[in-house]
Image: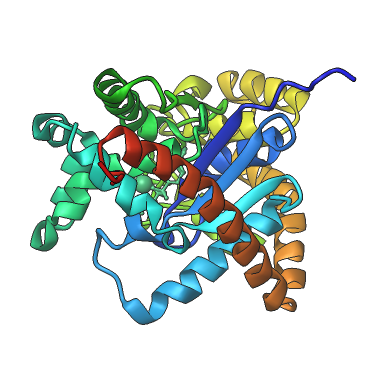
Amino acid sequence: MTEQTPLARSFSGMQPTGSIHLGNYLGAVDNWVKLQGQHESFICIVDYHALTIPYEPVDMPKRVFDLALTFLACGIDPARTTLFVQSSVPAHTELCWLLNTVTPMGDLGRMTQFKEKSDQHKQNVNVGLFDYPVLQAADIALYHATVVPVGEDQVQHLEFAREVVRRWNARFGEYLAEPKPYLSKTPRVLGLDGKAKMSKSLGNHIGLLETDDEIAAKLKGAFTDPQRLRRTDPGRPEVCNIFTLHGALTPAAEVAAIDRDCRAAALGCGDCKKMLGASLSQRLTPIRDKYAELSQRPDDVIGVLDAGGRRCREIAADTMAETRARMGLKIEAP
Ligand code: ATP
Ligand code: MG
């Protein structure tokens, strides 16, 4: 019998900070679904991370549950992916502490997400927000994951995570794995304002579970090519967020026709947006249907998270035993 090479591990996470949007889907979740089977996949609902911005404790369990339900509706298959909640594996915070001790503060102060979130939440610039990238490095390192499917905004955090791992390995011996980002074709989906990235917390998003009518209404006001002032002006698809979304959602032949007709002013922005609405409906209807169906079986969702937590606690215990020993935290009789 030939021995099979074990699959590389992939790990990614999402914060339960609000309803999942098209950017999350096209930047991350769609890849999570596609990579299942190619890697040994871990998907984590990162509730510890979500505590770093203002929130209501009573809302958190519902948000976590809802995110799990949404992932399953999107096609995350518990037979091929370990889906779990971060706080069900306390080792995440323990490893974070150990990695903190090899992390220079200056590196954390340079993180774009820290600067942006500190600006957004001036009343609560907490140590957790500052330390977020170290916890993220720990999340991944705990499972020796090397492949991390994320959106472009997380690339800086992954470079940082690699450095932390390198520093730790240099000090305590090669053990932790260096993670690399894995990006989709649309790693940075812009919000409806066409300026900032689409975000749960900025209110510029299209929710994955919104109705066709709600989406059509949002698309009407969405930013396109700012130089296209009249219907008769030729458009520039390369600067248009709506066209980028077509690229991810509409069949290639139709995208080529849209490109041609937009440039020739044969297709107006209103009609182009209606076509995008149709593509979205086609992609999202099965997800909404599955979401409605799974909502009837909440115990199944909890069962998936419980099983995921159990498996991850076992893996994490192994990693922590070795990590602690290497750092001199294993007491033995002299
Ligand atoms: P928040 O505003 O609370 O930070 P978020 O929308 O940025 O929420 P996260 O939970 O921080 O969502 O990120 C989850 C995943 O979605 C990450 O891999 C992130 O890179 C990806 N992602 C988030 N926004 C986008 C976007 N606009 N385009 C592509 N990927 C995105
Ligand atoms: Mg984010």
Q: Position of residue 237 (x, y in %)?
A: 52, 23
Q: Position of residue 51 (x, y in %)?
A: 29, 63
Q: Residue at x 41, y 37 (%)?
A: 322
Side of 72 relative to 90 (left or right)? right
Q: Residue at x 76, y 50 (%)?
A: 79
Decide if residue 206 is in sight here. Answer: no
Side of 79 relative to 198 (left or right)? right
Between 30 and 213, the residue placed more toward the observer is 30
Ligand 1 found in image quarter? top left
Q: Is residue 213 above or below residue 136?
A: below
Q: Position of residue 43 (x, y in %)?
A: 56, 47
Q: Quadrant of residue 38?
A: top right
Q: Position of residue 267 (x, y in %)?
A: 63, 31
Q: Quadrant of the N terminus?
A: top right
Between 311 and 48, the residue placed more toward the observer is 311
Side of 305 relative to 183 (left or right)? right
Q: Residue at x 54, y 62 (%)?
A: 67
Side of 295 relative to 150 (left or right)? right
Q: Residue at x 50, y 39 (%)?
A: 143
Q: Is residue 147 above or below residue 58?
A: above
Q: Is residue 147 above or below residue 279?
A: above
Q: Quadrant of residue 6?
A: top right
Q: Quadrant of the C terminus?
A: top left
